[in-house]
Amino acid sequence: MSAVVKIEMVVVINELHRLTVAQLLAGQTHTAKKRVYRITNERIVNGVADYNNHTFAEFLKGTAHNLQL
């Protein structure tokens, strides 16, 4: 893939993000996440909330485990 194509792709993605932000600011609701991503997100949030009860190494190991889909 050439550098020009990569730059064009970045520009398109940037415009899509701007459009999404504008839509959210205008009051449009965000589309629902897929079930697998919602479950993974809940696992990560719970792990971060329980951060103080584990060593840093245990926290990283748990986070890495929860990122495996």
Image: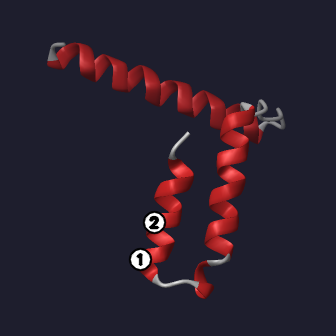
The quadrant in which the C terminus is found is top right
Is residue 63 shown above or below 19?
Answer: below
Callout 1 amino acid: Ala
Is residue 55 shown above or below 2?
Answer: below
Residue corresponding to mark 1: 57
Labelled pair 2, 1 in contact (Cβ < 8 Å): yes
Callout 2 amino acid: Lys
Pick the residue in front: 13 or 36: 36
The quadrant in which the N terminus is found is top left
Q: For mark 2, give the secondary structure.
A: helix
Question: Residue at left 62%, top 86%?
Answer: 53
Q: Quadrant of residue 47?
A: bottom right
Q: For mark 1, give the secondary structure.
A: helix
| Crowding near the residue tagged with mark 2, few <14, some 14–19, many ≥20 C-alpha atoms within 10 Å | few
- Residue 61: mark: 2
Question: Residue at left 75%, top 41%?
Answer: 25
| Crowding near the residue tagged with mark 1, few <14, some 14–19, many ≥20 C-alpha atoms within 10 Å | few
Residue 26 in the image: x percent, y percent?
79, 36
Question: Residue at left 56%, top 54%?
Answer: 66
Q: Report the side of 42 relative to 19 (left or right).
A: right
